[in-house]
Amino acid sequence: MELTANDEIQVEIDTNGFEHRISPIWKEYIAISPGESKDGKLRANCKHCKNTNIIADSRYGTTNVKNHLEKCRAYQSTLSPRGKSVFNQKTYRELVAKAIIKHGYPFSWVEHEGNRDIHEFLCNDVKTICRNTAKADCIKLYLSLKDQLKDTLRNLPGRICLTSDMWTSCQTEGYLCLTAHFVDANWKLTSLVLNFCHVEHHSGKEIYILLLKLIKDWGIENKVFSLTLDNASSNDKAQDYLKATLNGWGCLLYEGKFFHVRCAAHVLNLIVKDGLKVINHVIVKIRESVKHVKASEGKKIHFRSVVEQAGLKDTKAL
């Protein structure tokens, strides 16, 4: 509703003796009769915040009434999409869950006083949530998106190429990452991480059991074309078991002839490592030189002066 300061007050007297205001702006207020007000004047309270007590006499115009609505957060939150969007608690919780997942916030973030103050300032209709609710919302969002992705994979016109990689954290915990690569109905190449999960043992049998479980969970047994792995012996064993199982189910093309693909990046990495071994003595000297220069602030200053004397202009640091 667009309200202007020039809205005219059209007054009629109803059967109870109250002035009936036809101007649209008065629909947002509740009239208080002169007999109920302290000063004996006709007044009105805002329907939304209920914290106002404005004189509603026709001689005062609607400027003060309009000014209040422009500042009233409760009223602003109820405007139609033509103005501001109507607050929705469900949408608010979904956005909070997405923010936690996207930026890696702890669940306790929703309980931080400063964070709650911001949300309540933006909309006083918001109902802040606790960490357990935030956790449940994140899991609910994950399951919803997982179901959507399952439908996407199930309806693909072609097959899916999988890549799997093992990763060990600084706490020596093992993890497996499974990624799907496919061409969708619009001929767009898409890569999506399906799983990033913990692995207790890096044996071929354990990797095979986990990969088979993940593939069955996504319902893509009949859509797998190839699996790319690095050259670890455990991966070779795992793909042998997996190929035999999928072949037994009749899921692979050409009996799995093109199923196993060795990771070219891993092969290239091994080549580079062997090459670095040849010049390892030179690399060690360079590293020790850098450590010597960076050992103290005095050495850094002296090194910079030498660089300036040599006329070298380079912004790169050691």
Image: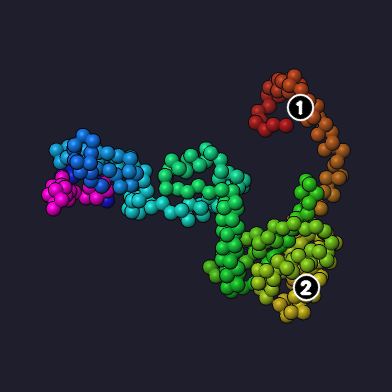
Report the residue marked by disc 2.
243
Name the residue at 69% across, 31% down.
317
Of the pair 38 and 310, the residue shown nearer to us: 38
- Asked if one can make out residue 117 in the rendered structure from this viewpoint, the answer is yes
- Name the amino acid, label 2: Lys
Report the residue marked by disc 1.
294
Name the residue at 68% across, 24% down.
311
The image's mark for residue 32 is none
Membership of 147 in magenta stretch: no
Name the residue at 45% across, 48% down.
126
Q: How is the image coloured?
A: rainbow
Which of the 4 image quarters holds residue 105?
top right
Q: Position of residue 142 (x, y in %)?
A: 59, 59
Name the residue at 78% across, 73% down.
243
Of the pair 10 and 2, the residue shown nearer to us: 10
Of the pair 65 and 155, the residue shown nearer to us: 65
- Name the amino acid, label 1: Lys
Which segment did they paint magenta? 9-29
Mark 1: which secondary structure?
loop
Left or right, residue 86 beside residue 293:
left
- Asked if one can make out residue 2 in the rendered structure from this viewpoint, the answer is no
Packing grade of label 1 (10 A; few <14, some 14-19, many >=20) is some
Left or right, residue 222 beside residue 166:
left
**Position of 253 relative to 30 (above/below):** below
Left or right, residue 36 beside residue 274:
left
| Mark toward the start of the polypeptide (2 vs 1) | 2
Packing grade of label 2 (10 A; few <14, some 14-19, many >=20) is many
- Nearer the camera: disc 2 or disc 1: 2
Q: Position of residue 150 (x, y in %)?
A: 60, 68
Quote the CA–CA distance across marks 2 and 1.
53 Å
Q: Position of residue 261 (x, y in %)?
A: 75, 66
